[in-house]
Amino acid sequence: MQKGEYLSLHRRCIVFDAHNDLLHAVLSKQRQMVQRQEMGHSDIPRLLEGGVTAQVFALFIPTDELPSGPLRYTLHLMDAFYEALDKAADRLLLARTAADIRRAKEEGKLAAILSMEGAEGIEEDLTVLKMLYRLGLRMLGITWSRRNKAADGVSDEGPDEGLTDFGRELVAELNRLGIIIDVSHLAPKGVADVLEASQHPVVASHSNAYALCPHYRNLTDEQIRAIADKGGVIGVTFVPRFLTTGPADASLEHVLDHIDHIIRVAGVDHVGIGSDFEGFSDPSPKGLEDVTCFPNITKGLLERGYSEDVVEKILGGNFLRVFEEVVG
Ligand SMILES: [Zn+2]
C-alpha cells in the first residue's frame, strides 16, 4: 500500500489513545513532555507526528507512594501536566468536553484527557473527586492491580469480592459528574458489578482478548460482550505480554488480531486503541516502537479489508462517542 493512501486517512481521523503513562515517567524518571526526546515511547512532538488527536494520560500512583499520600501524588502528576500545558499551550489543550477534542483536531493540537488509574487518589472522599473533576479529571479506573477501598484489582488468584459499598457510591458519583468509568485492571466480579451499577457506558481502556492471549489482565468474550451491550469500548493495548504468550515476538499483527477478535465478538462499534505506551518496559511490538508508529495501525486495518468508515471508528470514533455520551 502506498504511504499516501493510508496517511491521508490517518490524518483525517480523530485518533484517540485511551492510555499512556507519560506523566508517571515524568515524575519518576526525570522525563519531560514538551521537547522531542529519544527515550521512552512518547512526548508531545512525537504524539502530534503520530497523528494522535486525543491522548488519555494516566494518573497512576505507584504502591510505594501510597504511604505518603495518594492524593498528594495525584496532584503532583496533575502539576506535571499543567506545567507542560503552560509551556506548550500552542500545541496542547486539556479536553473537558468532546467539543475540545474536535477543536484540537481543527487546530492541529493534542487534546489531553486526564484519567486516574485506581481510585486511591481520591482518598475515599467524593468531594475530592468533585474538585479533581474541576481540575479536568474525565476518566477513572476503579482499581489498578491491587485492592483498594472500592474493589479488588485483577491478579492471578487474588481476592475478588466485587464493589464495596464505597465502590457503589463512587460509581454513582462518577455517573453524576460525567466521568468515564474504566474497568481495565478490575477483577471480574468488580467488572460485572460496575456494569450492573453504572447508568452510563463503561470502557476498558487498555485490555486485550483473553481468547487470543490467556492473561488475567485480558477480557473474556463474555466480558467483551457485556461491555459492548452497555455501549462501551475496549482499547486494545500494545503491552507485549497481553498480546501473545510469546511476548518477545509481539508485533503490530498481534494488535490487529485482537482488534479482529473483538469485532467478531462485539461488532465494529466497541473497539479502540489503548496503547499503554510508557507503561511497559519490555521491547515494544514490532511496527509499534513508539507513538510515531500509529499510522501503521491504519495501514494494517486497511490491508485487512476494513472500510475507511470502520477504520475511523477503531482509531477514535468509538471512544469519542463514549466520551461525548458520558462527559458531554
Ligand atoms: Zn495499566
Image: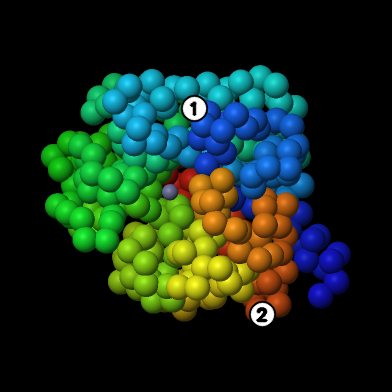
* Residue at which label 1 appears: 77
Q: Amino acid at mark 2?
A: Gly
Residue 321 seen by the camera: no
Answer with left or right where residue 111 lies relative to residue 196.
Answer: right
Question: What secondary structure is marked by label 1?
Answer: helix
Residue 257 seen by the camera: yes
- The yes-or-no answer for disc 2 within 8 Å of ligand 1 is no
Answer with left or right where residue 64 lies relative to residue 319.
Answer: left
In this picture, is 65 found above or below 265?
above
Can you tell which of label 2 and label 1 is closer to the viewer? 1
Answer with left or right where residue 128 lies relative to residue 254.
Answer: left
Q: Looking at the image, how many numbered discs can be counted on the residues?
A: 2
Measured Cα–Cα span from mark 2 to mark 1: 41 Å
Which residue is painted at 33% across and 70% down in the image? 220
- Point out the image quarter for the N terminus: bottom right
**Front residue of this view, candidates 116 and 175:** 116
Q: Amino acid at mark 1?
A: Leu
| Residue 287 spot, x, y in % from top left | 69, 65
Residues marked 2 and 1 touching at CB (< 8 Å): no
Packing grade of label 1 (10 A; few <14, some 14-19, many >=20) is: many
**Mark 2 vs 1, N-terminal side:** 1
**Front residue of this view, candidates 285 and 109:** 285
| Residue 133 spot, x, y in % from top left | 41, 27
* Residue at which label 2 appears: 305
In this picture, is 289 found above or below 220?
above
Which residue is painted at 61% across and 21% down in the image? 83
Which residue is painted at 54% across and 56% down in the image? 282
